[in-house]
Amino acid sequence: MAEVLVYVDHVDGAVRKPTLELLTLARRIGEPVAVALGAGAEATAAVLAEHGAVKVLTADAPEFADYLVVPKVDALQAAYEAVSPAAVLVPSSAEGKEIAARLAVRIGSGIITDAVDLEVGDEGPVATQAAFAASFTTKSRVSKGTPVITVKPNSAPVEAAPAAGAVEALAVTFGALATGTKVVSRTPRESTGRPELTEAAIVVSGGRGVNGAENFHIIEALADSLGAAVGASRAAVDAGWYPHSNQVGQTGKSVSPQLYIASGISGAIQHRAGMQTSKTIVAINKDAEAPIFDLVDYGVVGDLFAVVPQLTEEIQARKG
Amino acid sequence: MSLRIVVCVKYVPDATGDRHFADDLTVDRDDVDGLLSELDEYAVEQALQIAEDADDAEITVLTVGPEDAKDALRKALSMGADKAIHVEDDDLHGSDVMGTSLVLAKAIEKAGYDLVITGMASTDGTMGVLPAILAERLGVPQVTLLSEVKIEDGTVTGRRDGDSASEQLEASLPALVSVTDQSGEARYPSFKGIMAAKKKPVESWDLEELEIESDEVGLEGSWTAVDSAAQRPARTAGTIVKDEGEGGKQLAEFLAGQKFI
Ligand SMILES: Cc1cc2nc3c(=O)[nH]c(=O)nc-3n(C[C@H](O)[C@H](O)[C@@H](O)COP(=O)(O)OP(=O)(O)OC[C@H]3O[C@@H](n4cnc5c(N)ncnc54)[C@H](O)[C@@H]3O)c2cc1C
Ligand SMILES: Cc1cc2nc3c(=O)[nH]c(=O)nc-3n(C[C@H](O)[C@H](O)[C@H](O)COP(=O)(O)OP(=O)(O)OC[C@H]3O[C@@H](n4cnc5c(N)ncnc54)[C@H](O)[C@@H]3O)c2cc1C
């Protein structure tokens, strides 16, 4: 059976959920061979094996942390040459897309980004993408070279499928470009204890209607009652009410949760681009004409300062 | 010595218009107005600020696109760029990111550069990968997704706010930079700028001039193929209630019904 390379996104050995989803998709196409790089790479093997990786290729070197993107491309290319896979799958994070893109040029292959589904086709894997702020669904394939495909979070279920997951050291030689962009310093983002925005099953977002940083605790309280991640519109972010890392939309994060709750957000096209594929959409807005209501499964026309706290209280009461 | 900056800008269909695909599954450009991708305005803005801080700099804006793409170049010129290059050729129709990046790389090399600046992503394809591909093709450092950028003594430094960390980056010129919409609001063209832009040079290059064969680009030369494009069915109209004091409770009832509580 053909092998499929899966690039592993992990933090010090803790594998992030989108990678486990990739393993589910990879198993449709062939036998997943995972590539884990950097500190803690070997620690990823157990969970990768549990989810279907037949092999885990690992490498660690200071270059992975000290320089931007290219050392990881060198390593993924080494894995590609060692394995001759039928496809290369990479999570659609900002960095993942850049790694995939550079690998694709190097190996003379087409690239598809932000796939939301993958199936087997006569001429190789067929990827589903959402285009034009998710108003269109396209099916595409790579017609030259080995398909390189980046996949969005929440595109497939995480499934257990125990496999060997034998760890093998990957020999990597860094090219001249590897040390081109130095990472002079790195400030890790502080954890809020809430789920990762792109991976969360429920996202609760606030916009300009929240009217001040001091009011965002209303949104956070609702999120916490549901075990949700907190999102924000660009208007709220630009006003300095919430960090940019929580922005949902075209230039923020793209989310596709089971439930999206928008409060005080009008629903501009750029915001919709980042949340329109959510399964169930709920909005609270005092303007009955707000475009967000065109998208909703359930909408409340009303003042969020009344509706959101009442909702939070009711959820807590029901949970007992 | 003069700092040569090339800014890549894309001409895209207006996102607020009714965007759709043509019969050959490429973007339909006839039914929707085109404009300079809003995210590339940030790239032009950063180029202008870098040029203002430099002793001597020249900004060239570059686009690969159909005839109307000149509009995008004019906008960038009216913001303050010095000159423009338009790569235009019938054989470019339907190019994917590999074809487009090949043309951009050849054009940038022909123009001459110390610094290439791009937007973070286009507002139509929204792949966000062209900058990295371009750096790979040009063989220069990629200093991408910057929310802050500075050029000093032949070194580019910048801040990249990533998913899990904020990083301070550094590279030597020549280099490729991409900037996000957090890098600073783009200026509006002044009346004077608009008038001046009319006199600024816009060169037109075709594939032959760049020594690119027609089968390396366009639909035929693409390394990807789109098999189908379908409009997503409109969402079925949802339930909308007016809050009369019980809106939160009613919403909780809905969420419970959907098993979210
Ligand atoms: C809905 C849709 C889906 C697509 N899917 C794919 C796909 O899966 N695979 C694929 O290979 N191609 C795809 N394409 C084609 C691809 O988007 C374009 O070929 C291409 O111009 C590069 O991608 P981008 O515009 O998404 O660039 P991005 O990587 O998002 O653009 C980043 C920056 O590159 C610069 N830039 C991009 N294009 C140009 C240009 N023409 N002239 C000057 N500067 C430019 C701009 O500075 C821009 O801000 C798709 C196009 C559309 C409309
Ligand atoms: C290139 C580009 C990229 C962009 N990227 C993004 C992006 O990634 N994400 C994004 O979100 N935007 C993005 N935008 C901005 C986008 O166009 C909108 O400006 C933005 O989404 C508006 O945010 P908002 O809905 O919070 O604010 P507004 O549009 O001002 O809407 C506020 C809403 O709150 C309602 N409201 C006010 N008070 C209350 C109350 N007390 N109770 C209930 N409702 C209330 C109002 O009725 C209104 O509908 C981008 C724009 C551009 C040009």
Image (cartoon, rainbow, N blue to C red):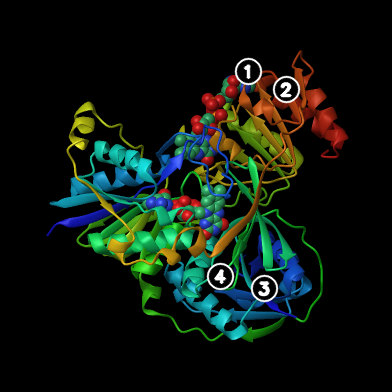
Label 2 Cα neighbours within 10 Å, binned few <14 / some 14-19 / many ≥20: many
Label drawn at residue A217: none
Q: Which residue is mark 1?
A: A287
Distance in Å between CA atoms under marks 4 and 2 = 49 Å
Mark 3 chain: A
* Rendered position, B196 above or below B201: above
Distance in Å between CA atoms under marks 1 and 4 = 50 Å
Residue A40 visible? The answer is no
- Element class at badge 2: strand
Q: Earlier in the sequence, mark 3 or mark 4?
A: 3
- Element class at badge 1: loop
In contact (CB < 8 Å): disc 4 and disc 2? no
> Label 3 sits on what residue type?
Thr
Q: Earlier in the sequence, mark 1 or mark 4?
A: 4
Distance in Å between CA atoms under marks 3 and 2 = 44 Å
> x, y (%) of residue B237?
76, 27
Q: Residue at x 52, y 32 (%)?
A: B16
Q: Earlier in the sequence, mark 4 or mark 2?
A: 4
Q: Is mark 1 within 8 Å of ligand 2?
A: yes
Label 4 Cα neighbours within 10 Å, binned few <14 / some 14-19 / many ≥20: some
Labels 3, 1: one chain: yes
> Label 4 sits on what residue type?
Lys
Label 1 Cα neighbours within 10 Å, binned few <14 / some 14-19 / many ≥20: some
Q: Residue at x 53, y 70 (%)?
A: A109
Labels 4, 2: one chain: yes
In contact (CB < 8 Å): disc 3 and disc 1? no
